[in-house]
Image (cartoon, rainbow, N blue to C red):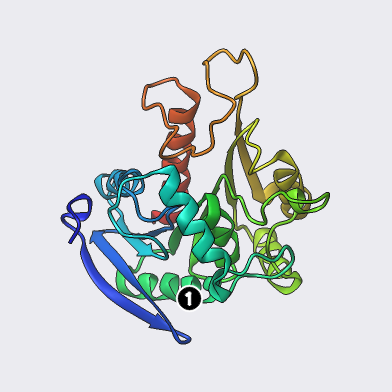
Amino acid sequence: MPAPLDGFTCESFTFDGRTHDVYRAGNGPAVVVMHEMPGLHPGVVDFGRRLLDAGYTVYLPSLFGRPGAPYSAGGSMRSMLRVCISREFRLLADETAPAATWLRALAAKAHTECGGPGVGAIGMCFTGGFALAMAVEPAVLAPVLSQPSLPMPIGAARPAQLGLDAADLAAVKERTQDGLRVLGLRFSEDPVCRGERFDTLRRELGDGFESIEIDSSEGNPNDIPKTSHSVLTLHLVDEPGHPTREALDRVMSFLGERLRE
């Protein structure tokens, strides 16, 4: 067990011919946390420990990369090159990635194991949009999209697209009409997760979508760099009153509103 994951148990989960390791710890309602590039790095695990401390059962699937390895730009590039040629994570603008099917099954399993009203699903960067795709699963009650970056913003239309096929988008829209809420986080100047994507989410989901867009423009009052991207991990400033800390606090309250009896 890598040191950053001490205290978690690891088991393999197989569904629809796909297998990934899942690290689990805690008690209470289930929250599935999907890591960003390059993999399940210590920053993601630290976020998971916040959820443990708040009384949740945390599921950390290892979808790519080496679990517990520290974040590095080189590691991110290597992981990106590998997943870009993987059929499981195919990067199409208007089609749901096959990985979403496995993640929905994991959410259903977590709900069965933990009980409660439902499950939280938090995606980051490359996996940010997977949390939206998981909302097709009825057990998912608290989807959080942190800087959802797929499809990559290459070409005129792609920055606004969701990486979700029409049937899945229709299913999520129907659920929002029945009370589902979706939370999205991004930095205002993020060149990877651009504002057009959040415009699409607002248009498609209406009041079912709550957005937090943190000012990272030139000269912003909190000196947040324009290059900031990872709201909950790498670029979190864990100080009361800081916009990223306020975003983290909203994630925690959102989970509590949706998952506590």
Residue 82 point in image, percent of width and height:
50, 65
Is any atom of residue 77 visible in this view? yes
Label 1 CA crowd tier, 10 Å (few <14, some 14–19, many 20+): many
Which residue, as the protein is rendered here, is positioned at the far right? Answer: 156
Q: Which quadrant: the C terminus?
A: bottom left
Residue 190 point in image, percent of width and height:
62, 35
**Mark 1 = which residue?**
102
Residue 44 point in image, percent of width and height:
36, 48
Q: Secondary structure at mark 1?
A: helix
> Which quadrant of the structure image shows residue 87?
bottom right
> Is 224 rendered above or below residue 97?
above
Please report the residue visible at 23 percent of the width from the left and 60 percent of the height from the top.
25
86 vs 235, left or right, is right
Please report the residue visible at 38 percent of the width from the left and 60 percent of the height from the top.
65
Q: As rendered, which of 247 and 39 lies closer to the eye? A: 39
Q: Which quadrant: the N terminus?
A: bottom left
Please report the residue visible at 44 percent of the width from the left and 64 percent of the height from the top.
118
Is any atom of residue 142 visible in this view? no
